[in-house]
Image (cartoon, rainbow, N blue to C red):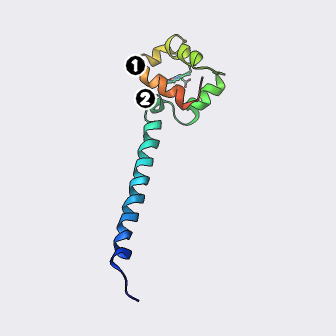
Amino acid sequence: MKVRFYDISILPVIFLGSLLVAYSYHKLELAAEDFKCLKCHKGSRSLPNIVKEKNIKTAEELRFYIRKGPKSGLHVTVPEEDLEKAIQYLNLK
Ligand code: HEC
């Protein structure tokens, strides 16, 4: 049986296509996890752990802890944008 040209030429297309999909997926994942909070909050002090421990249930409570709570001094350098990202990351309302 003869191998037709299009049989071969479709292979790199599929290959490149799946690479592209994998790559953009990876980018999206990175974007979701790329905010300042996570540089300090890792492992046992991860944001989900802290939120559970402090019983933080709403975005408002989280904003309060970061901006006016006893540890707000540790968070003066955290940009507003990252606080909003953290709220999304933690699924707070
Ligand atoms: C410069 C490092 C750093 C960054 C950046 C940072 N934190 Fe913290 N955060 C700490 C430290 C240190 C503590 C106190 C020790 C602990 O509880 O782990 C803390 C405590 C907290 C607490 C508990 C507050 C309390 O009163 O006990 C919350 C909630 C919190 N961080 C959320 C965040 C969020 C959300 C962000 C991003 C918007 C963030 N942190 C960014 C270092 C940081």
- Residue position for label 2: 36
Verify CB contact (< 8 Å) between mark 1 and mark 2: yes
Q: How many marks?
A: 2
Q: Is residue 44 visible?
A: yes
Left-right relation of 41 to 53: left
Q: Secondary structure at mark 1?
A: loop
Q: Would you say the beta carbon of the disc 1 residue lies within 8 angstroms of ligand 1?
A: yes
**Residue 77 percent location from the top left of the image:** 40, 19
Residue visible at 39% across and 59% down in the picture: 17
**Residue 65 percent location from the top left of the image:** 55, 15
Left-right relation of 1 to 45: left
As measured in the structure, the alpha-carbon distance from the residue carrying label 1 to the one carrying label 2 is: 9 Å
Which amino acid, by three-letter code, is at mark 1? Thr
Q: Which quadrant of the structure image shows residue 35?
A: top left
**Residue 41 percent location from the top left of the image:** 51, 30
Residue visible at 61% across and 20% down in the picture: 58
Residue visible at 65% across and 27% down in the picture: 52
Q: Would you say the beta carbon of the disc 2 residue lies within 8 angstroms of ligand 1?
A: yes
- Of pointers 1 and 2, the one earlier in the residue sequence: 2
Checking the image for residue 77, the label placed there is 1
Residue visible at 56% across and 19% down in the picture: 62
Crowd rating for badge 1 (residues with CA inside 10 Å; few <14, some 14–19, many 20+)? few
Q: Residue furthest bottom?
A: 1
Q: Residue furthest top?
A: 68
Which amino acid, by three-letter code, is at mark 2? Lys
